[in-house]
């Protein structure tokens, strides 16, 4: 057995030869395995082995006596190494990878013998630049001599081609089985026209790609993917499996153009119905056509752009992408640049192409192969029906019907309305869920038509619109259709509404005859949203859309200087039912009316350290007002005394009408004005025998009950504006 000594290593004082038994290295020992850089010259052919793959620089090739050169990364030195690392197969025993079964063997692999050519030598710096050696054909040896000459018309088969360059949008290739008969030509494949290995039917490649994609999605997506201009080839990109030197099969001409006497051919590996060429122009697309495209950019709260062909893009709106609200509200984490998807053309005209992924998936059984056309019946979306669950896109710019209400868009251009009382279960109602609407307050001025949420703090320039934070335009929600009448679709966001309201037609008719809407009873304390406030009173909307009204004198026990500012549209309030007239509910929101008058407590009956039950009557930015049971007296609990924990949003803890137990912390008499400061911290009631009862407001804190003695007590005497101060001065 013959071998060749590559180098000598010293170990523990002894010199040990490093020997290779590889036949190619043995046969090349005399002429092609150098040991001294001084003997090398440009274009010299050498033989060595790959000793290292470094993703920063390229592939290192070693020869005799430790002499090492580099095939730079830009010259293909990492065309295998990077992908091997991504697939976690970058080990000393790495021999082949899964992609070779589609494109031929790899050129550079760790420890593989390789023929290289010297491209540069710097003796002083001892630097040796290499490139993979390829046999050069002499002028007399015409490599294209045996190739068939073709005109290469659109749709014509080209046979095999070799990859010579890989970029994000295109790979440049060289034809192997034929040549263009019309002169100079360049051949390339756009990523929208390239079928990845799994799309060509290989189970192994499909499995490898799915694992890579799963691994990629399990991470919190990289910053590159969140950028709409991503240029990194990810595992879902069609070119992720492609290497320089690989051989592609079954390639055909998809398009061509002539520039400066050079014909540029767009080749394709994708196949369409009856092996027809892929559509390349807008005019080639018709309503109902099925095709595939590659995600080129992602627009949050809108949809994704697909590259259908070179120079031709189409848009898939969010509502046509998925029926999963979680996916739609985080598109950049749900889809990847370079990902291929099947779609159906829903509009093609005036330079615009609209697409639907959902239609493609729902009609998958009818689509035998890409390129099949769906009928108008398959494309037609029926109007949503009662009790049907639908995905909606919030559109705050639409005019609200019977405001306050949330207006939404659905598939196929349908619009729906969700009343403010249907945005959540009554127990989960929040104050001003749709925001304040248009604010016309000038900074530093007093002229307002709508006050900021809960407390009148802040303002805005004229024309500014506050839509709130719960329902942002472009966000997606899942709703249930309550009714469809005269083309108007009423929706609800309440959980389980459809299951609780299913009834047969006879029951529905009987229900309508008996009582159109369930009404509260006289004496009930109910929650409601303000729909309008004017000189006739405050108009409300109760649960299930029942309308109510409060006359001005019943708005509060205190004088309300500006009812419209005090009770803006969408404000959540509590009131006591006075009467029901013609289906409309008359309410009283005065604090003294919310509870009976018997055994009323007076100011002198209340002492510091008393713990008294009451009801939350109003929420402001600086705290909440509590009306004591059996009393006309109210107190203020400052925000610093609401909880043992830091309070970010008062409305998350309390709502008007909540029953609480309050600690009297201070009593002040300023002339005829009375001030009572309260505390609602759970630690104040930790040792009470009834601390677990529903009448005590708890905030989930386990703080020591003694820790409240120095908690911002000086802030209880804050100066309040006239409207807030007068309520606590009784």
Image (cartoon, rainbow, N blue to C red):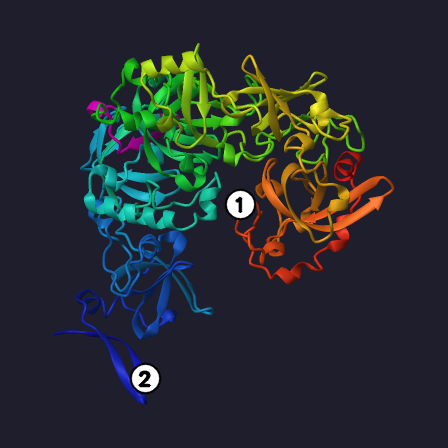
**Rendered view: 652 above or below 706:** above
Residue 141 percent coordinates (x, y): 22, 44
Q: Are marks 2 and 1 in contact (CB under 8 Å)?
A: no
Q: Secondary structure at mark 1?
A: loop
Q: Which residue is mark 2?
A: 10
State whether residue 315 appears in this view.
no
Q: Nearer the viewer, residue 183 or 485?
A: 485
Is residue 413 found inside the magenta-colored segment of the image?
Answer: no
Residue at image location 53% in from the left, 45% down from the top:
694
Q: Which residue is mark 1?
A: 694
Residue 687 location (% of width, % of height)? 58, 58
Relative to 159, say whether 48 is above or below: below
Q: Residue 572: image x %, image y %?
A: 60, 31
Residue 613 falls in which quadrant of the image? top right
Q: Residue at x 28, y 68 (%)?
A: 33
| Disc 1: CA contacts within 10 A as few (<14), some (14-19) or many (>=20) | few
**Screen quadrant of the C terminus:** top right
Query: In this picture, is 33 found above or below 536?
Result: below
Q: Is 269 contained in the magenta span?
A: yes
What separation in Å lies between label 2 and label 1 (alpha carbons)?
Answer: 83 Å
- In the displayed orientation, state which residue is furthest to the top: 486
Report the residue that reaches farthest toward the front.
Answer: 599
Q: How many marks?
A: 2
Please provide the residue range marked out in magenta. Answer: 257-276
Q: Report crowding for label 2: few under 14, some 14 to 19, many 20 or more residues within 10 A (C-alpha).
A: few
The N terminus, quarter of image: bottom left
- 67 relative position to 700: left or right: left
* Residue that appears at 28% across and 36% down: 195
Residue closer to the observer: 22 or 359: 359
The residue closer to the viewer here, 660 or 166, is 660
Give x and y (percent) for residue 157. Answer: 21, 29
């Amino acid at each position: 057995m013959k071998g060749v000594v590559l180098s000598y290593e010293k170990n523990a004082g002894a010199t040990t030869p490093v020997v290779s038994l590889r036949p190619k290295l043995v046969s090349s020992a005399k002429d092609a395995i150098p040991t001294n850089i001084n003997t090398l010259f440009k274009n010299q052919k050498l033989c060595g082995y790959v000793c290292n793959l470094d993703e920063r620089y390229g592939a290192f090739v070693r020869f005799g006596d430790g002499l090492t050169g580099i095939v730079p990364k830009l010259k293909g030195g990492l065309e295998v190494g990077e992908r091997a690392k991504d697939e976690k197969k970058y080990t000393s025993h790495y021999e082949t990878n899964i992609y070779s079964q589609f494109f031929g063997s790899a050129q550079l692999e760790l420890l593989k013998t390789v023929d290289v050519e010297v491209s540069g030598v710097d003796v002083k710096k001892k630097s040796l630049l290499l490139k993979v050696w390829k046999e050069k054909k002499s002028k007399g040896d015409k490599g294209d001599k045996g190739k068939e000459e073709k005109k290469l018309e659109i749709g014509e088969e080209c046979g095999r081609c070799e990859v010579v360059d890989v970029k994000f949008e295109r790979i440049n290739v060289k034809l192997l089985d034929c040549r263009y008969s019309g002169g100079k030509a360049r051949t390339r494949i756009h990523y929208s026209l390239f079928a990845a290995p799994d799309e060509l039917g290989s189970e192994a490649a499909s499995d490898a790609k799915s694992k890579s994609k799963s691994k990629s999605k399990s991470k919190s997506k990289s910053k590159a993917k969140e950028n709409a201009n991503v240029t990194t080839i990810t595992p879902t990109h069609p070119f992720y499996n492609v290497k320089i030197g690989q051989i592609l099969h079954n390639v055909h001409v998809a398009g061509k153009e002539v520039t400066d006497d050079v014909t540029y051919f767009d080749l394709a590996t994708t196949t369409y119905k009856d092996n027809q060429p892929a559509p390349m122009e807008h005019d080639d697309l018709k309503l109902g056509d099925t095709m595939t495209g590659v995600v080129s950019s992602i627009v949050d709260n809108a949809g994704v752009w697909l590259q259908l062909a070179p120079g031709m893009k189409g848009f898939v709106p969010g509502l046509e992408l998925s029926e999963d609200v979680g996916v739609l509200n985080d598109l950049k984490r749900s889809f990847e640049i370079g990902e291929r998807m099947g779609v159906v053309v829903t509009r093609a005209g005036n330079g615009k192409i609209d697409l639907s992924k959902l239609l493609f998936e729902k009609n998958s059984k009818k689509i035998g192969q890409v390129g099949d056309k769906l009928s108008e019946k398959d494309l037609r979306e029926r109007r949503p029906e009662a009790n049907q669950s639908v995905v909606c896109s919030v559109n705050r710019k639409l005019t609200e019907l019977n405001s306050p209400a949330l207006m939404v868009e659905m598939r196929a251009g349908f619009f729906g309305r969700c009343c403010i009382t249907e945005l959540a279960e009554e127990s989960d109602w929040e104050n001003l869920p749709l925001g304040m609407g248009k604010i016309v307050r000038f900074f530093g001025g007093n002229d307002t038509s709508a006050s900021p949420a809960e407390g009148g703090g802040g303002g805005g320039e004229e024309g500014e619109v506050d839509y709130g934070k719960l329902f942002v335009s472009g966000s997606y929600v899942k709703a249930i259709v309550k009714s469809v009448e005269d083309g108007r679709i009423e929706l609800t966001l309440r959980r389980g509404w459809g299951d609780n309201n299913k009834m047969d037609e006879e029951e529905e008719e009987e229900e309508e005859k008996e009582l159109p809407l369930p009404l509260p009873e006289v004496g009930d304390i109910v929650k409601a949203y303000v729909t309008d406030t004017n000189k006739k009173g405050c108009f409300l909307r109760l649960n299930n859309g029942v309308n109510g009204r409060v006359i001005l004198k019943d708005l509060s026990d205190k004088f309300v200087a500006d009812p419209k500012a005090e009770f803006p549209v969408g404000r959540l309030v509590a009131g006591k039912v006075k009467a029901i007239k013609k289906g409309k509910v008359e309410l009283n929101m005065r604090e003294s009316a919310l509870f009976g008058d018997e055994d009323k407590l007076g100011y002198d009956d209340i002492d510091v350290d008393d713990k008294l039950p009451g009801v939350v009557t109003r929420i402001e930015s600086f705290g909440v007002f509590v009306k004591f049971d059996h009393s006309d007296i109210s107190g203020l609990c400052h925000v610093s005394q609401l909880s043992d924990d830091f309070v970010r949003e008062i409305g998350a803890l309390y709502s008007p009408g909540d029953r609480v137990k309050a600690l009297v912390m201070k009593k002040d008499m300023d002339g005829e004005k009375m001030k009572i400061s309260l505390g609602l911290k759970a630690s104040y009631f930790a040792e009470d025998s009834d601390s677990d009862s529903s009448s005590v407001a708890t905030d989930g804190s386990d703080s020591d009950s003694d820790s409240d003695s120095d908690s911002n007590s000086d802030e209880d005497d804050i100066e309040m504006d006239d409207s807030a101060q007068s309520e606590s001065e009784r």
